[in-house]
Amino acid sequence: MAGYKLLRRLEIIIHILDAYPYTSKEDLKHKLERDYELQLTNRTLERDFKALETDFSIGLQYDASKNGYVLDKQDRKRIQSFFKYVELVHLGELFKESLEDFELLREKVVLEDSAKFKGIQHIKPLLLAIKKRKAIAFVYENYTHKTLNSYKIFPLQIREYANRWYVIGVPRGEDHIRTFGLDRMQQLQSKEEVHHHLESYETQLQKFHSVVGLNYNAAEKVERVLLAVTLRQFKYLNSLPLHHSQFLAHKREDGRMELSYHVIPNYELKMQLLKMGPEIEILQPSWLRKEIKTSLQDNLKQYKHEK
């Protein structure tokens, strides 16, 4: 896998091509040198292009009519995953360089408090189990019912959402995948039992691409969700999209922007919409518009009687 310096170059190259489609090799080298003080030969640039394709499955398309390169639109999900990976590498490098001055790091780089979060130690054995298709056993705490239950699952993926880590897996003897929070897992053990047909769950895993967060119901379907958002909120959503399917559908005469999504409208999506309050209006589908309206009205009732 790519080293830190190469990762930084690849990240910059993607950013440039994302901002300036159909950039030629000469223009790309010029921007790298002028804006980032990186001097690359044609041979090095070719190796970087090859690394993007080989290590991260991100393709660059050459358009002869425009004499430039453009990112493959089909690779958008991979590009987003790549940026997340690079972000984690950057943080790791930062912490590594700051080990000799931890107090300075603690004071000047303020991260969200996750001191009480448990479960990070499970990531490595889970990744090994995924790689080897082996089962894992653990005791799982149910916060709602205040119970402890034993599970044996075949892990498929590890996912992060809202600064928490989860493992997606198939419980032994079942046909549907389930999500488990790493912070609720205890006494994790790797088992020798191997599952040879994990590919059959790929269709279920793909549904996570159609939701915000990690909650989906197999009976629900993907729908077009259309929002009218204020210009201020649009700037936030443009820099940090609510979902990877987000795109600008229309600029309205009242100054608001219409954003379109193709998602399964789950609980997490509804909570995100409610958090934006008066900055947005749900236009479609009509049932979701009514549901959010009812939630807002119920919320307002709690403030009916001033103290």
Image: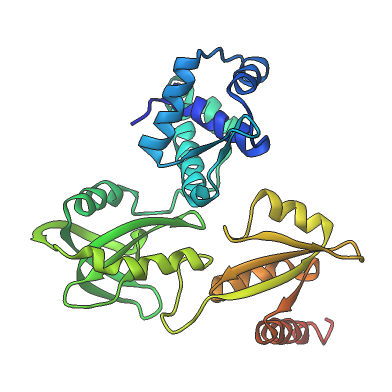
Q: Is residue 66 above or below residue 184?
A: above
At 61% from the left and 19% from the top, the residue drawn is 26
Instruction: Using the rendered image of the protein, determine whether residue 238 is visible from the camera's viewpoint.
Output: yes
Residue 53 x, y percent position in the rendering: 41, 36
* Front residue of 163 and 84: 84
Which image quadrant is residue 263 in?
A: bottom right
Q: Is residue 192 left or right of residue 52?
A: left
Q: Is residue 105 left or right of residue 170?
A: right
* The C terminus, quarter of image: bottom right
* The N terminus, quarter of image: top left
Task: Name the residue furthest right.
Answer: 254
Q: Is residue 224 above or below residue 126?
A: below
Instruction: Using the rendered image of the protein, determine whether residue 179 is visible from the camera's viewpoint.
Output: no
Residue 162 x, y percent position in the rendering: 52, 58
Residue 205 x, y percent position in the rendering: 36, 66
Which image quadrant is residue 298 in?
A: bottom right
Q: Is residue 210 left or right of residue 270?
A: left
At 59% from the left and 61% from the top, the residue drawn is 245
Q: Is residue 26 above or below residue 57?
A: above
* Front residue of 293 and 198: 198
* Front residue of 28 and 261: 28
Q: Is residue 102 left or right of residue 174?
A: right
